[in-house]
Image: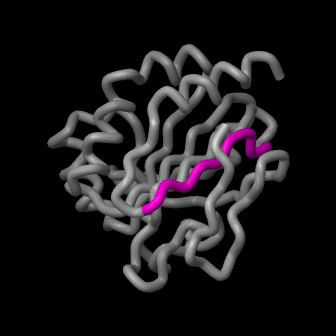
Amino acid sequence: MTELQQAPSSVLAPRTGQLAPDFELLNQYGEPVRLTDFRGGNVVVVFFPFAFSGICTGELCEIRDNIAAFKDSSATVLAISVDSKFAQRAYAEQEQFGFDLLADFWPHGAVARNYGVFDEASGMALRGTFIIDASGIVRYVVVNPRGQARDFAEYRQALSSLAGQ
């Protein structure tokens, strides 16, 4: 597992073994999605900088194309950026994402701040991934530097480790 790198936020990201901060955001259809509603199953929270950007699109399309790996681990994917629900919907439709894209639009980046992955200087979320188990405990955390895509193989390894817990 990759160790969390220091994010440029005043809030420290939750560490493995800690309870994940709850949140409620609107998805691309304007429906409220609350993290605690997924208790009993695993959740992969994927923060990404912006809809329609190159690296983000590549990462989310890799998740889309390999969604079976998440479903096989009883994991729901929740992808979050500071974009509006309208931008999220257009993005989801264009790329045919079959998972929720959540709008951390207002208050701007509040959930990303609570997870320690909001970059105040640029006004966007960093590429942070949090895998949360069925009890709401963070089991995997990684934050990638700007411009560096996440390693999909690490998702597989982290998800497979949940089976043994």
Depth check, front residue: 159 or 33: 159
Q: Is residue 127 magenta?
A: no
Picture layout, residue 96 above or below residue 159:
below
Question: Which residue shows up at 70% across the image and 47% down it?
Answer: 36
Looking at the rendered image, the quarter that the N terminus falls into is top right
Picture layout, residue 22 above or below residue 46:
below
Residue 163, by quadrant, is top right
Examine the residues drawn in magenta and state their main secondary structure: strand
Question: Which residue shows up at 59% across the image and 73% down it?
Answer: 113
Q: With 46 as the anchor, is 116 left or right in this view?
A: right
- Count of all numbered marks drawn on residues in the image: 0
Question: Which residue shows up at 41% across the image and 43% down it?
Answer: 100
Q: Give the magenta part as a residue range.
A: 137-145
Q: Is residue 143 magenta?
A: yes
- Give how far across and how far down residue 109 sits, in percent: 49, 73
- Give how far across and how far down residue 63 sits, in percent: 38, 31
Picture layout, residue 22 above or below residue 84:
above
Residue 52, by quadrant, is bottom left
Picture layout, residue 108 above or below residue 129:
below
- Give how far across and how far down residue 64 sits, in percent: 34, 29
Looking at the rendered image, the quarter that the C terminus falls into is top right
Depth check, front residue: 3 or 127: 3
Q: Residue furthest bottom?
A: 121
